[in-house]
Image: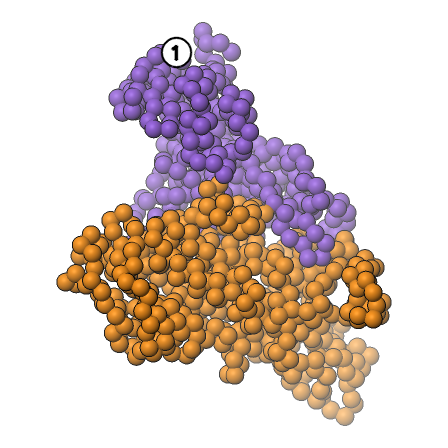
Chain colours: A orange, B purple
Amino acid sequence: MKRLIVVALLAASANAYAWEDASTHAGLTEAAALGSHLHARLKALGYERGLYEPLTIPPEDASSLVAALRQYAPTGGFVPDGRGRQYAIAWLVGGAVIADGPFIANHFYDVWTKGGWIEPSRGVLHGLLTWMANVELFEAQDSWRDLRDETTGVPLPERGVPAPDWVVASNNPLAVDGFLDQYAKAIRGSSPGERSRAMAGALVAAGAIAHVLEDMGSPSHVRGDARAHLDKLGTGDADLGSRFERIAAVAYGRVGVPGPERVITRPTLRAFFTNDQHDGLADVTAMRWFSAYTLPGTVRIGTGGRTVSPPLVKPQPAPPTRLNLMAASQPQGTTLDDGHGVCLARYRVDRGMLSFWLDDDCMLAEVGAILPEVSSYTAGVIDFLFRGELDVSASGGRIAAKAKGALGAGTLELLSEDARGVRSPLGGARPVAASADGAALGDAQLPDDSVRAIALFTGVDAAGEKIVAVGVVTVK
Amino acid sequence: MIRTLLFALFLAACAGPEVRVAPFRARPDATDAGDLRGPFTGKVLDATTRTPVAGALVYAAWSFQSGAGLQSAAGAHEFVGSTDATGAYTVPILAHVPKDTRLVDFELLVYKRGFVAYRSDRRFADLGPRMDFAQHDNQVLLERWRDDYSHARHLRYVGGGAAVAALTGWEADEAAAEMSGAPKRPGSMGTDLTVTTGRGPYIVAAQLLSEADIKAQTKYDGSFETGPLGDEPDTTSYSSQHFKALGRGETYDVALRMWRLDPGAAQTRYEELLGSLPSAQENNAIASRSLIAAEGDIRGVAFFDGQRGIVVLLTCGKNQCATDESAAALAQKIYDRIQSLWATPGSKP
């Protein structure tokens, strides 16, 4: 039944160059946030309603951000009201929704080549015009580029920054540096309004980082399969996209995306994407699943035995050498599964030729297995970004801060908050050397009117990753 | 084979460049696809008793996209309404699709405190795709809320929008408590399932004043975001409408609160307002009794209609209503509309 529903809805849904923003990305991030420790973390920071704390970014302070969010229907739950107010979780989801924009080509990572998006070959004419557009020998290169786009279809970026590099890139406005900057401002900001605005900004950046990681759960994004994003989906020439990702959108929408089955932990941000143990999301996805145009190639079945070795576009996953060629000889072919009953591909033998393909049912099964995994990684990266904690105590009129977990070098700021919610620094930022778990970082005298004492560390953690660590305590 | 036929059917229906094919049927008993533009009609019933649910929020949103190939979201259009006394709703047709965009989606949300919300695209029980939504004569069966349901899950299901957020604000507190591991509070959803007074047509605040009414009176050239106020949820005896000036401060806002009670209780409510509103002065210029009040940059006008048991409080920022007369004129417009919606012997039509 679900299969028919998906097929019936396919033609009615939007384009997909990645997980669809307002449905799959929004759903993944929302489900992950609910499954992460972010609610508790926000409460520990003084936001009593946690994920449901209303936070405001006045539209005049971030007009482009608010304008971008208002391009979406408010029914999605991530469009702020007229005054720029919505819940903390909605800002996080909003960040995940708007992350594509002009940066969509930076959300790919081929785990074997370590490269990012490369525009797929689209015929001889397209190739020729691309070459002419890029060679200085020919004048008016932009004109060649325009001519190429007009004659050969939809304009696409030629190259993209690999996704794990993009989340730390200096030219990415929603990279980890932007997140940390806003997060620190959300702690040291003087007024509650400033802090609310900065926390919303930090959540937007965190959502955008989560989005890039979520894209690593789509096989074509991590197997160098740009061509999978140019499948014709509707009647219009411009109606191109990934059928796999559209199936995810129509099958699960926003609210149906499954939540995390666990919360993944990794020592560094990059390790959530890829690492030497091959358990980053990109690694896991690339090695476990095929994408539309990286299936095993067609091969002639020999007469001598039942072992076959179809050519592989990517080393993994490799089909077993002994396939069920009897079943594959039926007109409908048979299924190659992953050992747990989830379809990896279909295969069929026709006139002695063994071929593989992905149909909608198979992709739907893959999506069902992939999304909870992606959600688990997303929950993990959310917790990772907000991981920094400090032990803060306030007694005898003094605040004292200790490391909670080992820290690298950085700076420590101590603040007090009065009954109006105004925070004031207690002296300047002081340098702190690498510290072991529980090591004292600094202390200061608290003003008499303090109702809260706050410690803020900005620097690196024991693994050398940038971190903002915070501790907040109520003054008795 | 079925799949191929369905796919071909939908592809064929995709011919129009500006409006995608609707993923829902035109009518419950029809096989042809509906029209994303609308109009939409239907009836909202209590799933348990099959009785009409009046005063439920009906929130609709159309989504647009633009671009070729790398398409992007290109805005949305909202409609906020409510069900009438028979539970019926009508969402008017989308007047136009913005230039250089295509209409790609329509979503309808029905929300009433005490019930599980309804979305046109998804079911709450399993979050699976809803396939029984129809453009015309749609039947919405609202399931009564159960204390074992999750508010966090419900808020996720409901989504957002100013009108929805105003009504679901209280649920965020419940969701926050739930996420923090606090024990569930039985009955926290409240049961706004009480019967109406049974007198006259069902009227809600959203019917009584429009953005155009305000602009005609105050000459304001900006836009408003409209929806219920967040202070109290709408019930059968209370409803509200907030006109929040976009990009402006509260002194440009207009808000309307309406109580519909037995006449005696309505008079008591009015007298409470008279006693509690700052600088309240009775002038009896509208309906049975009326007053004007002011606090800071906000003007207030309240009136009591004894015949119908209605009390209305209009508040208007001083940058929107420059004078007391301007605020009173809006209140008079509201009273005129009440009279037109609920004619009584001796009242003007």
Left or right: A98 as drawn, with respect to A362: left
Above or below B304: residue A7: below
Q: Quadrant of the C terminus of chain A?
A: bottom left
Picture coordinates of residue A114, whole percent (x, y) = 61, 78
Q: Identify the residue shown where x is 29% and y is 21%.
A: B279
Whether residue A102 is visible, yes or no, is yes
Q: Residue furthest front?
A: A428
Which of A30 and A12 lies nearest the eye of the viewer?
Answer: A30
Q: Residue furthest left?
A: A396
**Splitting the image into 4 quarters, where does residue A163 fall?**
bottom right
Along the line of sight, which residue is nearer the eye, A198 or B292? A198
Left or right for A241, reference A42:
right
Seen at 40% across and 18% down, the residue is B324
Answer above or below: position of B101 versus A417. Answer: above
Q: Is residue A370 visible?
A: no
Q: Quadrant of the N terminus of chain A?
A: bottom right
In this rendering, position of residue A251 left or right of residue A398: right
Q: Position of residue B65 (x, y in %)?
A: 66, 49
For disc 1, the chain is B
Q: Secondary structure at mark 1?
A: loop
Q: Depth check: A296 or B293 in front?
A: B293
Q: Residue at x 49, y 60 (%)?
A: A205
Location of mark 1 (residue): B285
| Residue most extreme to the top | B346
In the rendered image, residue B114, in percent from the top left (x then y), is placed at: 39, 40
Q: Residues within 10 Å of mark 1 (few under 14, many from 20)?
A: few
The three-letter amino acid code for the residue at tag 1 is Ala
Q: Residue at x 38, y 46 (%)?
A: B171
